Image (spheres, rainbow, N blue to C red):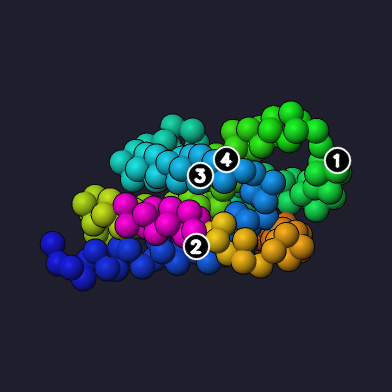
């Protein structure tokens, strides 16, 4: 297999994951976590995305056929999840942060680590419909080995980017961090609407 195949398998997935777009959302969703909680969340999110990606690579077509779903269904479902989460962060985020006791703060951090790492950071921010589609297309075009190598490389880049993201958060300060969180939630809502719209438009196009 040529090195060209590995590069062409890597690039579409890299663009689909969009690490630069994930970072502000990651910072916004994890601003209240301790450094240890962030590390656990980062590992959990990347492992979740990697497991799903490998599952899609080797059994994606079979899973879709057995469940009777399509990538457009994933777009709509993932978009709805992101929309609910973004609205919750925009409207209720300040109330959740207001005067927590130490025990409540620790409990909330653990709860956030357990939930936010899998959804929405792992799925669908890292491994969303666009990334899933890229994996399926790459497997058909370049084979299992090239696609698997590109997956490993992309997951490693995502892990490094998220692991060093707190350095950026400490540099900009808490007030800017909170502003980033609100803007990230707003963009998250816009992304979710775009995902839902794309899924519905594609469904309607198929029915014509």
Say few, some or many: other residues with alpha carbon within 10 Å of mark 2 (under 14 / 14 to 19 / 20 or more): some
Q: Are marks 3 and 4 in contact (CB under 8 Å)?
A: yes
Residue at the spot 27% in from the left edge and 60% down from the top edge: 141
Residue at the spot 49% in from the left edge and 59% down from the top edge: 164
Relative to 110, residue 95 above or below? below
Mark 3 secondary-structure assignment: helix
- Tell me where the magenta segment starts and ends, as one range: 152-164
Q: Are marks 2 and 4 in contact (CB under 8 Å)?
A: no
Say few, some or many: other residues with alpha carbon within 10 Å of mark 3 (under 14 / 14 to 19 / 20 or more): some
Mark 2 secondary-structure assignment: helix
Select label 2 or label 3 by which is in front: 3
Q: Which mark is residue 39?
A: 3
Residue at the spot 32% in from the left edge and 63% down from the top edge: 10
Select label 2 or label 1 by which is in front: 1
Relative placement, left or right, of 92 versus 106 is right
Mark 1 secondary-structure assignment: loop
- The answer for how far apart the CA atoms under marks 2 and 3 are is 17 Å
- The answer for how far apart the CA atoms under marks 3 and 1 are is 25 Å
Q: Which mark is residue 37?
A: 4
Residue 23 is one of the magenta-drawn residues = no
- The answer for how far apart the CA atoms under marks 3 and 4 are is 5 Å
- The answer for how far apart the CA atoms under marks 1 and 4 are is 20 Å
Say few, some or many: other residues with alpha carbon within 10 Å of mark 1 (under 14 / 14 to 19 / 20 or more): few
* Quadrant of the rendering where the N terminus is positioned: bottom left
* Predominant secondary structure, magenta span: helix
In the picture of the structure, the residue carrying the numbered disc 2 is 19
In the picture of the structure, the residue carrying the numbered disc 1 is 99
- Report the front residue among 137 and 166: 166
Residue at the spot 36% in from the left edge and 54% down from the top edge: 156
N-terminal-most mark, 2 or 4: 2
């Amino acid at each position: 297999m040529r090195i060209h195949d590995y590069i062409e398998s890597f690039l579409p997935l890299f663009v689909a994951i969009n690490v630069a777009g994930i970072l502000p959302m990651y910072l916004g969703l994890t601003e209240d976590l301790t450094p240890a909680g962030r590390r656990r969340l980062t590992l959990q999110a990347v492992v979740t995305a990697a497991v799903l990606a490998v599952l899609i690579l080797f059994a994606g077509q079979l899973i879709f056929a057995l469940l009777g779903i399509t990538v457009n269904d994933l777009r709509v479902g993932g978009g709805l999840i992101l929309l609910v989460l973004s609205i919750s962060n925009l409207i209720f985020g300040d109330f959740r942060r207001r005067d927590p006791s130490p025990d409540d703060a620790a409990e909330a951090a653990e709860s956030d680590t357990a939930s936010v790492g899998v959804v929405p950071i792992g799925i669908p921010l890292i491994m969303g419909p666009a990334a899933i589609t890229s994996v399926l297309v790459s497997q058909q075009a370049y084979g299992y080995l090239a696609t698997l190598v590109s997956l490993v490389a992309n997951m490693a880049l995502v892990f490094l980017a998220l692991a060093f993201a707190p350095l950026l958060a400490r540099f900009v300060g808490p007030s800017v961090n909170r502003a980033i969180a609100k803007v990230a939630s707003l963009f998250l809502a816009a992304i979710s609407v775009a995902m839902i719209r794309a899924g519905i438009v594609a469904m309607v196009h198929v029915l014509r």
